[in-house]
Amino acid sequence: MDVDGKVALVTGAANGIGAAVSRRLASEGASVVVADVDDTAGEALAADLGGAYVHCDVREPDASAAAVATAVERFGGLDIVLLNAGVSSGCGVAETFDLAAYRRAMGINLDGVVFGVNAAVPALRARGGGAIVATSSMAGVVPVPLDPVYCANKHAVVGLVRSLGPLLAGDGISVNALCPSFTETAIITGIKPFLEQAGTPILPVESVVEAFMAILDADRTGECWYVVAGRDSAPFEFRRAPGPRL
């Protein structure tokens, strides 16, 4: 995809992967709507990119609708969507389970993707198609005992993307998931010393940006692109599930 002249919406765009993708898209000629709850960083980034900022709590459907409306009203339409807002859960299990933390994590990591897709699809259809990328994680394809609830909502994003791909293909809308392993962003702050002690590679953000651009360039949909150290990013090959025996 040649992004020059395209209009992009990025949620969770004020920092980390979202900010880096926003900068890359703008550097290649796209108009970017920066959506986040960090108003200070988001407004500064949008001003730097010549884009637009919108306060967007992705847990609220109206917030995603407002972000899409900003893209249409400010730049004339919408072509590319990165649904990137995400948090670790920290909700624990059993005796340490925190209901508020659980609902926050599910609201941002899963509801935010569902609401973002529903808000974006009509605008993408109006342009004759486009691309939706949802930031999942390698936690969406492997177990993560450190944070089972985070793992659960990232698995849900993977299932959503794999199902939406064929559903929206007839509209010319591709839907894919970006599945990075541990990346140098604020989300790993609490566990970074443990990762370093264990010798676990930590990805530079730019590796994830390159994977995102590769997704835009590929003529594929309903795929989950892994991003892990030492490997070229590519779609994860899921085994076919066993069917019924006759």
Image (spheres, rainbow, N blue to C red):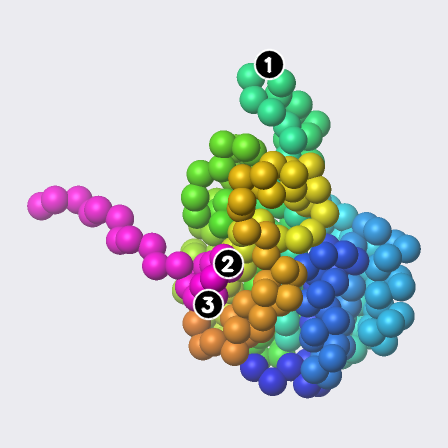
Q: Nearer the viewer, residue 75 or 90?
A: 90
Q: What amino acid type should be assigned to the residue bearing mark 2?
A: Ala
Q: Secondary structure at mark 3?
A: loop
**Residue 217 is inside the magenta segment:** no
**Residue 183, position in %: x, y?**
62, 53
Q: What's the residue type where badge 1 is placed?
A: Glu
Mark 1 or 2, nearer chain start: 1
Observer-side mark, 1 or 2, equals: 2
The magenta stretch spans residue 223? yes
Residue at the spot 69% in from the left edge and 75% down from the top edge: 25
Comparing 176 with 27, the one in front is 27
Question: In the rendered structure, which disc, 1 or 3, sits on the residue that comes first in sequence?
Answer: 1
C-alpha distance separating marks 2 and 3: 8 Å
In the image, which is nearer the foreground, mark 1 or mark 3?
3
Q: Residue at x 43, y 72 (%)?
A: 220
Confirm whether residue 146 shows in the render: yes
Location of residue 87 in the rendering, given as x and y in whole percent from the top left corner: 67, 43
* Residue type beneath disc 3: Asp
User: Which image quarter is the N terminus in?
Assistant: bottom right
Question: Picture coordinates of residue 158 (x, y %)?
Answer: 47, 51
Q: Which mark is residue 95?
A: 1
Element at label 2: loop
- Checking the image for residue 232, the label placed there is 3
Quarter of the view holding residue 66: bottom right
Numbered circle sitting on residue 229: 2
- Crowding at dot 1, Cα within 10 Å, few <14 / some 14-19 / many 20+, comes out as few
Q: Which of the labelled discs sits on residue 192, or is there none? A: none
Using residue 32 as the reference point, say whether residue 44 is left or right of it: right
Q: Is residue 25 above or below residue 243?
A: below
Q: Magenta-highlighted stretch: main secondary structure?
A: loop
CB within 8 Å, label 2 to label 3:
no
